[in-house]
Image (cartoon, rainbow, N blue to C red):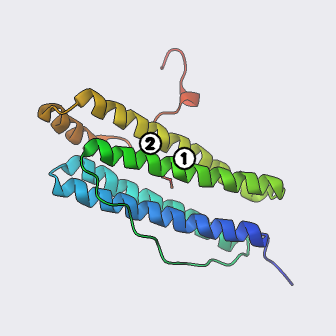
Amino acid sequence: MNTNRLSKTIEAALNAQMTKEAHAAQIYLSLGAWADSQAFGGVSNFLFRHAQEERNHMMKILEYILKRGGKVTVTAIPDPIPDPKNLQECFESVFKQEVDNTTWIYKLVKLSLTEEDWATWNFMQWFVKEQTEEETLAIELLDKIKVAGNEHSALYSFDRDLLGTPDDAKLAQDVTADKP
Ligand code: FEO
């Protein structure tokens, strides 16, 4: 009896997304190591925490495939990106990485819609929200770097702030008029 509740196409797309999340973790790890080597300890800590988040995303998908009776295929992870030249470039890479990932998540949502796989569609909604948060956070951090410019003291404060920066951004849909 076939107990696999995933179509071959969805199963392959979920497996591919698992590798993309693992790749994202490698990118954050690599950027975090670069930041530490540039004496940005706060940035490094933030990026290392984020690498762990990406691995959690990978595990979520892995567990979902298994729970739906599908087959998990663990593959090699592509190399991370080259080191950035400065903090601005570092966070531009973070933003780009998240936008790319959002594109893949949307493709999976569209595929589940086309196949009328409502369980996968429902599962993927968590990722849609997560991507919105991650893009918002990256935009906010890029804005802060822009304000800091090349001033050492401002960049130092930015770095210190990142030690305590929450890992999730506040989303527009959670805002009210009295709590903007
Ligand atoms: Fe797994 Fe940054 O998205």
- Disc 1/disc 2 C-alpha distance (Å): 8 Å
Residue 36: in sight, yes or no?
A: yes
Lateral position of residue 144 relative to residue 58, left or right: left
Looking at the image, which is closer to me, 140 or 46?
140
Looking at the image, which is closer to me, 65 or 89?
89
First in sequence: mark 1 or mark 2? 1
Q: Identify which amino acid the numbered label 2 is placed on.
A: Asp
Dot 2 corresponds to which residue?
168
Residue found at x 28% / y 52%: 84
* Percent x, y of residue 87: 26, 44
- Disc 1 residue: CB within 8 Å of ligand 1: yes
* Percent x, y of residue 143: 35, 31
Dot 1 corresponds to which residue?
130
The answer to whether 34 is drawn above or below residue 170 in the figure is below
Secondary structure beneath label 2: loop
Secondary structure beneath label 1: helix
In this figure, what is the number of numbered marks? Answer: 2
* Percent x, y of residue 18: 56, 66
Residue found at x 48% / y 49%: 98
Lateral position of residue 95 relative to residue 31, left or right: right
Lateral position of residue 107 relative to residue 33, left or right: right
**Neighbour class for label 2 at 10 Å: few (<14), some, many (≥20)?**
some
- Disc 2 residue: CB within 8 Å of ligand 1: no
Residue found at x 48% / y 19%: 179
Residue found at x 52% / y 46%: 99
* Percent x, y of residue 30: 31, 62
Q: Identify which amino acid the numbered label 1 is placed on.
A: Glu
The answer to whether 22 is drawn above or below residue 71 in the figure is above
